[in-house]
Image: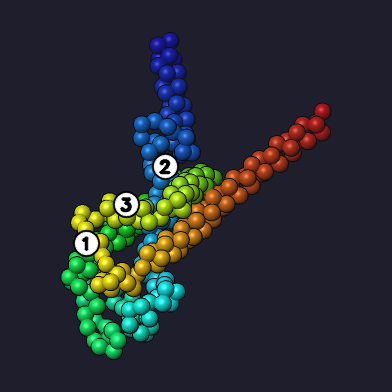
Amino acid sequence: MLHNQAGANLDSTGRRMIRGLDRWENGEHMGRVGWLPWSLFIIAVPLFLITASVTWAFNSPGLYNDGFEKYSISRISGITETDLRQVGADIRGYINSGDEPLSVRTRILGEETDLFNDREVAHMKDVKRLVWGVYILALVSAAYLAIMTVIGFVRQRGRFIEPLARRAMFGGGLTLALLAVFGIAAMSDFDSLFVKFHELSFANDFWKLDPRTDYLVRIFPDGFWLDATVWVAVRTITGAVALTVAGSAYLVYRRYLGWQREMKGLESAGDLN
């Protein structure tokens, strides 16, 4: 009798363990640890979409050149459009290299000279550190999303598509919500938000430059940064909408298939009766 009871207890424990593993596999385990990796997965979605878009912006020649043309920088600065394109390329090259300090020579009204003064060079060193931080966040978030996706498919195979679609939908929705909050703040007072960003991002005041004497703010006026922010937002929104729509569409499709199976089951039961 004791042997039978022990066997029954072991069998019951085994069933509970199997049910627990099933819940873990389906992303339904909500213990102390089970919910954390997938919550981080959802958070990593907006982190990746935003940092990837910022990375794209800093390395997009078109964004620089369109800004130079839109704000008539050649006329304002005395630098030809061809030389301005080279200045943009030099800045991108500096940001993506380990070279220090920033050294950009160009022709101003036909006379070759160093474009940036010591204060501007010091600020660009801070900007470079900040941009590299964005690069790291983009790589880390992308790696985390990829690793968790691979783990999900290895453990669940085809059954992982549905929870992946759900998490992609949540991640895309979170991204859109965050951008909506930022958009409202930016529309109300972009200049104050821009200043606050600099105060939080930099430990010094090298970013306080004068367009009358400093070419960095002369060739990249405030309007350029507003346009760049919109440029980043549009690409982030596009990615977020794609994830949200794709995830939602798959979940609706799965629900439709389930509904069809239920209807066929009811029809079969009716035929038997």
Q: Mark 3 touching mark 1, by CB under 8 A?
A: no
Q: Which residue is mark 3?
A: 196
Q: Mark 2 touching mark 3, by CB under 8 A?
A: no
**Picture residue at 25% right of the left edge, 61% below the top:** 208
Give the residue type that dot 1 points to: Phe
Q: Mark 1 touching mark 2, by CB under 8 A?
A: no
**Picture residue at 24% right of the left edge, 78% below the top:** 115
Q: Nearer the viewer, residue 169 or 214?
A: 214
Q: CA distance from mark 3 to mark 1?
A: 14 Å
Q: Which residue is mark 2?
A: 38
Q: Nearer the viewer, residue 18 or 58?
A: 58
Give the residue type that dot 2 points to: Trp
- What is the quadrant of residue 118 in the picture? bottom left
**Picture residue at 32% right of the left edge, 60% below the top:** 135
243 to the left or right of 190: right
Q: CA distance from mark 2 to mark 3?
A: 32 Å
Q: Residue furthest top?
A: 1
**Picture residue at 32% right of the left edge, 58% below the top:** 134
- What is the quadrant of residue 67 in the picture? bottom left
Q: Which residue is mark 1?
A: 206
Q: Secondary structure at mark 2?
A: helix
Residue 153 visible in the displayed image: no
Q: Secondary structure at mark 1?
A: loop
2 or 3: mark nearer the eye: 3
Quadrant in which the N terminus appears: top left
Q: Position of residue 198 (x, y in %)?
A: 29, 56
Quadrant in which the C terminus appears: top right
Query: How many numbered discs?
Result: 3
Give the residue type that dot 3 points to: Lys
Earlier residue among tags 2 and 3: 2
